[in-house]
Amino acid sequence: MKKNILYILSILILSVSFTACSKDDDDSGDDSQLGTINLFIDGNKMNTKSTFSVSSISYDKPTITFPKSEFSIMIIFGDNEDQSAFFNFKEIDFEKMKVGDDLLKLCKNYGYQVTYQGNEYWLNSDISWFNEFADGKGKFIVKELNAEKTVINIEFQDIKLPILKGSLLKPDRSKMIDIKGNMKYNIDFH
């Protein structure tokens, strides 16, 4: 009887220690289920770790209610959650996407919105002043895409966004930001 009790106690102690080790591994900062983010604004690396799980890459399939597909990249950065980068690509054919593609060449129109240091920066292909800033649209290159098309690595480069000022949201070339980086993430399907 004593041997059985000691055996059961030793199993419980071992299971608790393995659980503790497993928990420690989870807190090591490796969010491999989500992925990695490297975002640079004007050459400065943004801290994305504090709100890492809020960031996402998502694909909204066409539905009866919303017949146009959308592919979106959302990055929350900084120490507070009011700094973000949002890149949206409309009417993209996700099924045809492959490594080497530029998302801009796969979509009908797109929009970028970045909130940085209390300012809004925008570029949207639907806005009347877009052509004046079209050279800043950059590239969004698919660097990796797993066979199941559930994990993607996108490199963004050569993006220049103008600041928006005033109630009419007119762009101002005097203050523009450069954005580059990459994001490898699980794709959320909606």
Image (cartoon, helix red, strand yellow):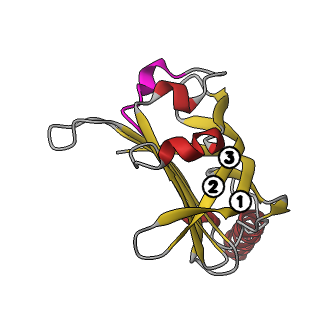
Q: In which quadrant of the rendered view does residue 71 lie? A: top left
Given residues 109 and 29, the one toward you in this image is: 109
Question: Can the viewer see residue 88 in this picture?
Answer: no
Residue at left 43%, top 21%?
Answer: 95
Q: Earlier in the sequence, mark 1 or mark 2?
A: 2
- Residue 129, compared with residue 165, is above or below; it is above
Element at badge 1?
strand
Amino acid carrying label 1: it is: Ile
Tell me the element at label 2.
strand
Place of residue 44 in the rendered image (x, y in percent of width and height, measured from the top left): 83, 63
Furthest residue in direction left, as rendered: 64
Task: Say if mark 3 contacts mark 2, CB within 8 Å.
Answer: yes
Where does the image place residue 5, in percent across and percent down from the top left?
A: 67, 75
Image point (82%, 62%), residue name:
45
Q: What residue is disc 2 on? A: 161
Above or below: residue 160 compared with residue 5: above
From what the image shows, is residue 181 above or below residue 24? above
Query: Can you give x and y, in whole percent of width and height, for residue 99 in the image?
Result: 64, 22
Where residue 23 sits, quadrant-wise, is: bottom right
User: At label 2, which amino acid type do we have?
Assistant: Leu
Q: Which residues are magenta?
A: 89-97
What residue sits right under mark 1 in the picture?
Answer: 177
Q: How many marks?
A: 3
Residue 4 in percent (x, y) is at: 67, 69
